[in-house]
Image: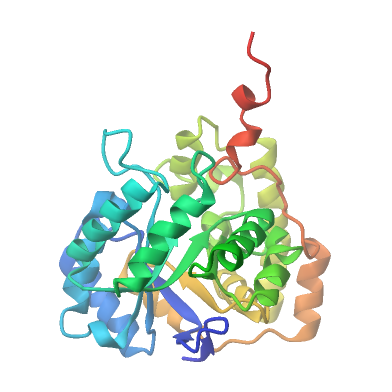
Amino acid sequence: MKYRMLGRTGVSVSRFCLGTMMFGVMGNRDHDECVRIMHRALDAGVNFVDTADAYSGGECEEIVAKALAGRRDEVVLATKVFHPMGADRNMRGNSRRWITRALEDSLRRLGTDHLDLYQLHRFDETVDIEESMGALDDAVRAGKVRMIGHSMWPVERIVEAQWTAERTGSTRFRCEQASYSILKRRIERSVLPTCDRYGMGVITYSPLAGSWLSGRYRSIDDVPETSRLTMMAKRWGLDIDTPANRARLEATLALQDLADAAGLPLAHLATAWAMEHPQVTSVIIGPRTMDQLEDLLTCAELRLDPDLLDAIDAIVAPGTDVVEEDPSVDPPSLQARNRRRPL
């Protein structure tokens, strides 16, 4: 396992970060197997673990606590706050009120007195950024959080947050977590260089593009009803057979040809590719089963040669997404109700 510094924090993290979203009711319901998966990853040299309060409604954090019993000091532990955690309309978002309570809840579920990295899962358009950063700064000063970060923030918000920290003297964000894959390269255009300018680490997730790059699909008909792709499409009221998904499949098949010619599984090529960018600190892998973890660990040190990287660039150009829209991360300003004058 190779390691890199998380920005200019002085904290060394593994190039693979173990993502735990698939632990619990959202994925693997067998707590004992999830613990074994985590222990295998730690034994393989992974020292970076990422979770979130919203994963399986907090169950995921409880599983992580079981796995880290007696091994907490080996791990750079990260969790996140923002998504709803109950029917109460104030049990969500980035308000001081909710961040303060959510942090205590996460610490309790994780069985620890501090987090190494606490992240705002999305930008909250309803809250002054000073409000959120003030709550996080208090948590850092109280010793409950070592570093703060954010996830899927647009570049203008990243810059605003850095300026706010300078203006108010509060703790700076030290890390951005972003979706990044061969099919989704937009962060190369401005997010990655901006984070580099501010000495921030970058953790990327979904290197397989939500399983498009898993190597399992040669046609839309290959995508089963039980797959993550189908479930995510239904979540946003979409059908799996859309022009956008056909464009993703077309690019996937071209990438599959490259992987075949290189003698690599497509999933390995895609995961190794995400680690090639010099401004990416760590790539989140999110295995649901032990077999998936073992398979991914085999490509932890895989490097792609320049000719192969150039061929990938010819299929999906640097700084571009195969499909621009993404309802899971598009800002509220793009929603129809916010683009129409009220009558």
Q: Residue at x 56, y 54 (%)?
A: 217
User: Which residue is nearer to you in this view: 341 or 97?
Assistant: 97
User: Which residue is nearer to you in this view: 77 or 123?
Assistant: 123
Colour theme: rainbow
Q: Position of residue 327 (x, y in %)?
A: 57, 40
Q: Residue at x 56, y 56 (%)?
A: 152
Left or right: 262 with respect to 124?
A: right
Q: Quick check: can you spot residue 25?
A: no
Q: Position of residue 5 (x, y in %)?
A: 53, 87
Q: Residue at x 66, y 65 (%)?
A: 256
Compared with 225, 81 (above or below) is: below
Left or right: 39 with respect to 202?
A: left
Q: Position of residue 275 (x, y in %)?
A: 60, 78
Q: Residue 343 lies in what quarter of the image?
A: top right
Q: Residue 138 lies in what quarter of the image?
A: bottom left
Q: Position of residue 12 (x, y in %)?
A: 47, 89
As drawn, the residue found furthest toward the front would be 168
Q: Residue at x 24, y 69 (%)?
A: 64
Total marks in image: 0
User: Which residue is nearer to you in this view: 293 or 152?
Assistant: 152
Q: Quick check: can you spot residue 205?
A: yes
Left or right: 324 with respect to 96?
A: right
Compared with 263, 149 (above or below) is: above
Compared with 223, 17 (above or below) is: below
